[in-house]
Image: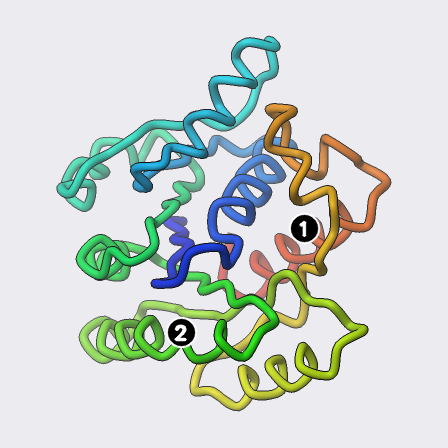
Amino acid sequence: MILALAGQKGGSGKTTTALAIADEWHRRGKRVLVVDLDPQGTARTWHRVAGENNIAGPTVIAMGTNFHRELEPFREAYDHIVLDCPPKEAEAQKRALMISDLVIIPCGPGTTDLWSMKATLDLAADAVEFRPTLQVAILITKRDVRTIQSGDVAASLRATNFPVFETELRNRVEYQEFPASGLGVTRYNPAGKAAAEIKSLVKELEKNYGN
């Protein structure tokens, strides 16, 4: 599977989610490649920290604007390829939509997060029209159940034309902490609630979108 984490807005949790899913797949014995398309290089830094601490994990590489062509030799070598798309880079996201099996669009809990989704959803709709086999799903991130606004945003997302994961990622400190360890969140704190959310997300992903 080629899985892309996409979205025009920064801060929605794309990289955090990409690393958490990739590392959970690695924990389950899958061969996983993370392609860091973000110039900030957060995924590459996470991988470097893992190497410095002798932690085995997914392979992480950087690719440029021609990644949609450069990926072809890697398809047979890995069970899953995870694309960490940069924000505000419509062309990179268009290319990711053209080669991915599944695109996850994370959305934070605020009204402005919802507003910023329109451009990404429009891109996704155009891609699905061109590639009917492309699967697109929305993931609610940083959810704070104590706020009314968070619930309103979740309801609005479920009214879009794209499916929304039943699993939601709450606003938990483990998501902020785990990258500095070089581990994914399910290995960083196996008994934590964030780990349970990612395990649930991967289970739902594999059940509904193929493994």
Please state the horizontal and vertical placement of residue 117, each as a whole percent of the image. Answer: 41, 74
Tag 2: Cα neighbours inside 10 Å, few (<14), some, or many (≥20)?
some
Residue identified by numbered label 2: 116
Residue visible at 81% across and 50% down in the picture: 193
Compared to residue 55, the image places residue 183 above or below, namely below
| Residue 155 screen position, x and y as percent | 62, 87
Name the residue rendered at 71%, 60% in the picture: 170
Q: Which residue is painted at 22% across and 32% down in the image?
A: 73
- 150 horizontally vs 99: left or right: right
Q: Is residue 22 left or right of residue 202?
A: left
Of 98 and 84, which appears nearest the observer?
84
Give the mark nearer the N terminus: 1 vs 2: 2
Residues at discs 1 and 2 in contact (Cβ within 8 Å): no
Q: Quadrant of residue 152?
A: bottom right
Q: Identify residue for label 1.
A: 198
Point out residue 120 in the picture as x, y percentages from the top left corner.
33, 71
Residue found farthest to the bottom? 159
Tell me: residue 175, above or below residue 120. above
Tag 2 secondary structure: helix
Q: Of helix, strand and loop, which one carries label 1? A: helix
Residue at image coords 54%, 82%:
157
Q: Residues within 10 Å of mark 1 (few under 14, many from 20)?
A: many
Question: Which amino acid type is marked by label 2?
Answer: Ser
Q: In the rendered image, which quarter is residue 142 located in?
A: bottom right
Compute the Cα span from label 1 to label 2.
24 Å
Residue 201 vs residue 10, the one in the foreground: 10
Question: Horizontally, is 35 left or right of 145 in the view?
Answer: left
Q: Amino acid at mark 1?
A: Ile
